Amino acid sequence: MTDVSDGVLHTLFRSDQGGHEQVVLCQDRASGLKAVIAIHSTALGPALGGTRFYPYATEEEAVADALNLARGMSYKNAMAGLDHGGGKAVIIGDPERIKSEELLLAYGRFVASLGGRYVTACDVGTYVADMDVVARECRWTTGRSPENGGAGDSSVLTSYGVYQGMRAAAQHLWGDPSLRDRKVGVAGVGKVGHHLVEHLRAEGAEVVITDVREDAVRRILDRHPEGVSAVADTEALIRTEGLDIYAPCALGGALNDDSVPALTAKVVCGAANNQLAHPGVEKDLADRGILYAPDYVVNAGGVIQVADELRGFDFDRCKAKAAKIFDTTLAIFARAKADGIPPAAAADRIAEQRMAEARPVA
């Protein structure tokens, strides 16, 4: 327990990255479930955030990820204008090996035990079909299939929001929101990334892609024999000559002490959560003249969709709200310029102000 108390408890109670309202450790030995549910804030309403299913190296790493992701969801939901706080859950293990109906049902019972303080949805390693199973035990489940009263795949609007963020960055930096003939590098062409490529090609952007899965890359290249090329890995992608925009769309930590100095792009705007590896990276980007569109702002299309599911899903209503990510991103860039701070800090200030104003005065 020494490592947990020194690390996790310090983060919860004494760190600037803490302040979480509740953290629940869940275990069901019969199904093999080990999960962490983290609720960062309910100031704006019930915590809303997805369930990540991932083979973490240690339980401590899983808890730390849940804490970081939950905190990020508070900021994301605030900036998206949703009446929801931030929460996140992680299930520990390789979903290809241990995911089962019994495990998902057990997980649903744990979420249900929170009585609506946390509303779950899909994330890395979980899909619409999984949420349909979870929903059998928990009515506070979104991201379900249309056949089961849900909105379906949230990656469609997630990619659309990132695309709007890119257009806002282009408007701010180059005076024109068009991405035609811009060279965009997309790292990760899975659930969200492949939809993003479709938006970019539809507008006439040149796209360079990479992914750890060869089949994901091949699917894109087969669909777009012209205008899309591939490189071996992310290291090669960030060094691609003539890159205008870099879009990290895989796991977090993509912007770090090694990658930032190597970036050739003038803009970073992607779907991955927690792209900044540590505090200070946002300043490193600004010092290099690289415009960073805060991840939790531009990738909010998915959470906008799943939140709408709670009131009776309407795709057109959601898409119109996701389109406003363009205006929100522009406002953040303007605030950053006015305050003389990086865009990530400007977004944090705006989100923190909304959450503070929502709290009842003692």
Image (cartoon, helix red, strand yellow):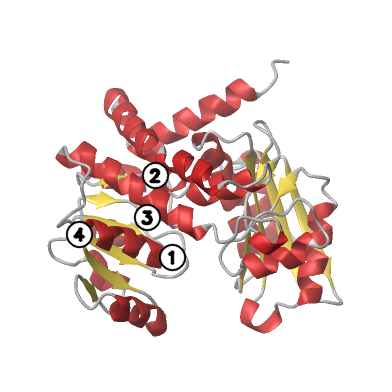
Q: Quadrant of the C terminus?
A: top right
Q: Are marks 4 and 1 in contact (CB under 8 Å)?
A: no
Q: CA distance from mark 4 to mark 2?
A: 24 Å
Quarter where residue 143 is shown: bottom right
The percent coordinates of residue 351 (x first, y second) are: 50, 32
Helix, strand or loop under label 4: loop
> Can the viewer see residue 341 in this picture?
no
- In terms of depth relative to the viewer, which is nearer, 216 or 350? 216
* 309 sits to left or right of 235: right
Residue 106 location (% of width, % of height): 82, 67
Crowdedness near tag 2: few (<14), some (14–19) or many (≥20) residues, C-alpha within 10 Å: many
Q: Earlier in the sequence, mark 4 or mark 1?
A: 4
Tell me the tag on residue 250: 1
The nearer-to-camera label among 4 and 1 is 4
Sequence-wise, which precedes: disc 1 or disc 2? Answer: 1
Residue under label 2, please give it.
294
Residue pictured at 59% horizontal, 24% vertical = 356
Measured in 3D between alpha carbons, the distance from the residue under mark 3 to the one under mark 4, in whole angstroms, is: 18 Å
| Circle 4: residue type | Gly
Residue 38 numbered tag: none
| Residue type of the residue flagged with mark 2 | Pro
Check if mark 3's residue and mark 4's residue have beta carbons within 8 Å: no
Pointer 3 or 1: first along the chain: 1
As drawn, the label of residue 270 is 3
The one nearer the camera, 243 or 321, is 321
User: Which quarter of the image is occupied by the N terminus?
Assistant: bottom right
